[in-house]
Image (tube, rainbow, N blue to C red):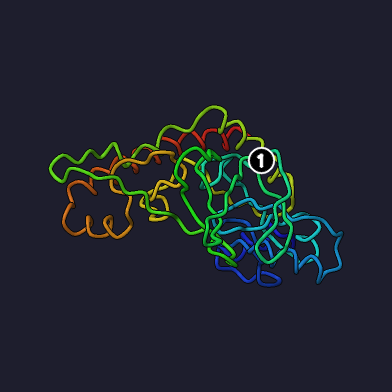
Amino acid sequence: MNSKERVMSAVNRQVPDRVPIDLGGMNTTGMHVSCVAALREYYGLEKRLVNVHEPGQMLGWIDDDLKEAAGIDVEGVFPPKTTFGFANENWKPWRMPDGLEVLVAGEFNTTTAPNGDILMYPQGDTTVSPCAKMPKDGYFFDAIIRQEPFNENNLNPEDNLEEYGPISEEDLNQLTQAVKQAAASNRAVTASFGGTSFGDIARVPGSSLKHPKGIRDISEWYISTAIRRDFIHQVFSKQCEIAIANLERIAQMVGSL
């Protein structure tokens, strides 16, 4: 039984030859870059810098040699851009506070605050306010709330939809190539497509935006679910509409492969 068959057997509530393993197939099943480095050392694999593909949580990329060594059954497909709005390309070295050297995207640009916090910037633009911080001696980034004043009597749902929209042809083409590559393996394919998020609280602060508008404070957003229900309903309705339209385009793309 290969990995793809093993996963499908489990999904169909059948008994596979062993329990399927997913490590790094999605952001929710990812592993911190320091743990990936330690796991590579444990298996005696080639010494190399680990790529950070999801900088918010500082998740490390699981290379093929580690997948083979650990018996991983899943191949992941990810959106072309990170939670901070820049692409995973033009890799460069970066040193963690604990001294571990890793590889990060070219637009992974940070500064250090007077108190030692490491500040991250949306789309790598250090001329605007930072969107996240890694506390001194920390291991991942927390969103910085950049809530602008808003008019309680004139809330515009479009302000909270700025980062949502039709998936671009460029992103769709990149996803097509990624799906083809993943499908060529004997592993089950899992995918986290951009442009299909709905109700994700992690997106409320607008960490990919240089100047987020609308309600961007997480506490204020939760309050809004109780006292501004019409506004929240309009935002969610539009998110759902955009996500369905994008999923239809993605499904057409996958179906044509």
> In what quadrant of the picture does the N terminus appear?
bottom right
* Residue under the point 51% across and 37% down: 250
Residue 169: x percent and y percent?
54, 27
**In-image side of 64 versus 52 (left or right):** right
Residue pushed farthest top? 169
- SS under mark 1: loop
**In-image side of 142 versus 16 (left or right):** left
Residue 14: x percent and y percent?
59, 68
Q: Which amino acid lies under the numbered mark 1 shown in the image of this protein?
A: Gly
The foreground one among 142 and 99 is 99
Residue pushed farthest left? 153
The foreground one among 16 and 244 is 244
Residue 85: x percent and y percent?
52, 41
Residue pushed farthest front? 114
Residue occupied by mark 1: 106
Q: Is residue 219 above or below residue 211?
A: below
> In what quadrant of the picture does the C terminus appear?
top right
Residue 197: x percent and y percent?
42, 47
The image quarter containing residue 20 is: bottom right
